[in-house]
Amino acid sequence: MMAFNPKEFLEWFQQAGGWYNEEYLGLKPFPGMGYGATALQDIPEDVPLFHIPDSLILSPYTSELSKYLTAEEWERVDRGWNKIILVMIRESGRGDESPWSGYLSNMPTEFDTPMMWNDEERKELIGTDIEDRIGKEDAEKEYKENLLPIIQAHPELFPPSSPHHTLDSFHIQGSRILSRSFTVPASRFNASPKPADGGDDESDFSDDEDEEGEETVVMIPFADMLNAAYQRDNANLFTDEKTKEKGGQWDKRGFTMKSTKPIGKDEQIYNTYASPPNSELLRKYGHVDVLSIPTEQVELLSEEEIGDWPFGNPGDEILIDGKVIIESIEAVLGKKRGDEEKWQAKVSKRVDWWLEEGLDDMFPLTLSPGFDDEFIAFIRLLLYDSEWLRAKKKGKLPTTTIDKDVASVIVHAVQIRLSKYTGDLKSDLEVIKSISADHIPRPTTSTALLEQSNADDVKKVDPSALRRCYAAVVRLGEKRILQVALRNAEKYLPQKRKAEDGST
Ligand SMILES: C[S@@+](CC[C@H](N)C(=O)[O-])C[C@H]1O[C@@H](n2cnc3c(N)ncnc32)[C@H](O)[C@@H]1O
């Protein structure tokens, strides 16, 4: 994991045409985070920190690989991330001859993303939003069916003895892309129009969207050296900044990382990964955010749910699948047992309408006292014929009133999700507390201490124990949200109301 050599990387970066602000920015290890950027002195807002010219971006457009393949072969890898993976495999295999040698040789080869977990470790994710989203089998199928035939057909490009195109290397490149890539408009590489990169919608921490909509996944050296944490970002990547007058030293088209807030000396320089929930952080980046939960969220939790550990990701969420809602409605109304075919047809029609309206059928629950309007509207659309007729006739979404039937559906859906986990909330807390605080950057250490401590001093933790702990943090966050949702929904049930009113 720590194969990174900052001196070597920075020398390569400068020689290859990159620029960075040596006065302001250094690279160093941070406990539990790998390497990251640090402020060498106070940095004002809006200062360029480094600049990457387009030519230094590693992509299917900047690498020459396509020149050596036939049009049919290049077309064959035009699916998902295949092109960029093949390019990374090829450029890694070229060693010092590759223009990206100092970049690729300094990239991580070990990851804590679930894609790299063994079967036992993956069991820890049962019940969570990640469980069905790892995609390892699909990725391996892609490798065998579409990449390997091209690799084998070109021993001059991919020598059979090279270690860079094995299945393991394929996974390493995939994990690098998952945790470090950016999505940029394909048009900046003068790409001729063609279908979008396809399939995988991994939008990452890029802040840019092409008006035409065609985007491409690329690797941007240096920009991927910044860590991120929930709402701690103090820098961001900008496109084509002409800021020579503000201290930049470049004149080429490219990407510029700039401070977006004043940053104190010795503080870590953070980019944003768009503040995803812990399940998504773990799936893509192999870590979780563990911060103090704001008071208004803590107040929603019972003592048992806090468990003396008021930490987590304040931006956590859990997605309730529309299919779980349908299952809950069937259970609450007992419809399916009545006339199954008619019921199925009715539900399909309504769900199709919902999707055709461009609405999503995955509904986020968060650690908050209410529910999303669309979540309630979806339930009402399926529950009530009157809502469906109105929606169909007037094109209007159902109302968002929570009555006892809607509440019963929510309660049932939440119970379905809760029943999928293998352990309870208490056991999650025990796992989390068994790991030393040094390994999960926690807010119990003051920020200054955390930034200044030396990662080399941190004793190595068993990677499997760390993964178990990360999974427990995800489970705990999800279960807390589900428990709060359960209490919120139960308030609308008559027996609950009576109990709260004190009536018999
Ligand atoms: C874009 S890279 C950042 C550079 C990376 N730390 C390195 O050493 O190369 C993203 C990776 O950094 C680590 N990382 C970033 N932010 C983190 C955080 N808040 N806590 C723990 N690890 C973090 C994760 O391993 C993640 O996959």
Image (spheres, grey):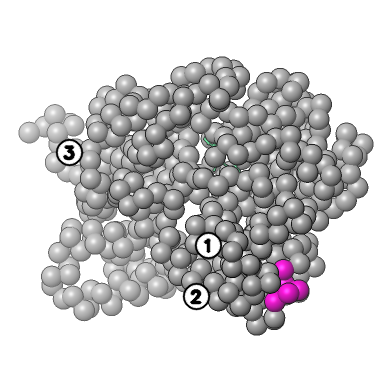
Which quadrant: the C terminus?
Answer: top left
Identify the mark nearer the N-term, 1 or 2: 2
Q: Which portion, as a residue range, is magenta?
A: 65-69
Alpha carbons under labels 2 and 3: distance apart: 56 Å
- The amino acid type of the residue labelled 3 equals Lys
Dominant secondary structure of the residues highlighted in magenta in the image: helix
Residue at position x 29%, y 59% from top?
325
Give x and y (percent) for residue 151: 60, 72
- The amino acid type of the residue labelled 2 equals Glu
In screen coordinates, is 287 left or right of 155?
left
Check the image and name the residue furthest to the front.
161
Give the residue number, with chain letter if any, for mark 2.
Answer: 145
Alpha carbons under labels 1 and 2: distance apart: 14 Å
Identify the mark nearer the N-term, 3 or 1: 1
**Residue nearest the viewer, comparing 348 with 215:** 215
Give the residue number, with chain letter if any, for mark 1.
Answer: 166
Give the residue number, with chain letter if any, for mark 3.
Answer: 496
**Residue nearest the viewer, comparing 475 with 73:** 73
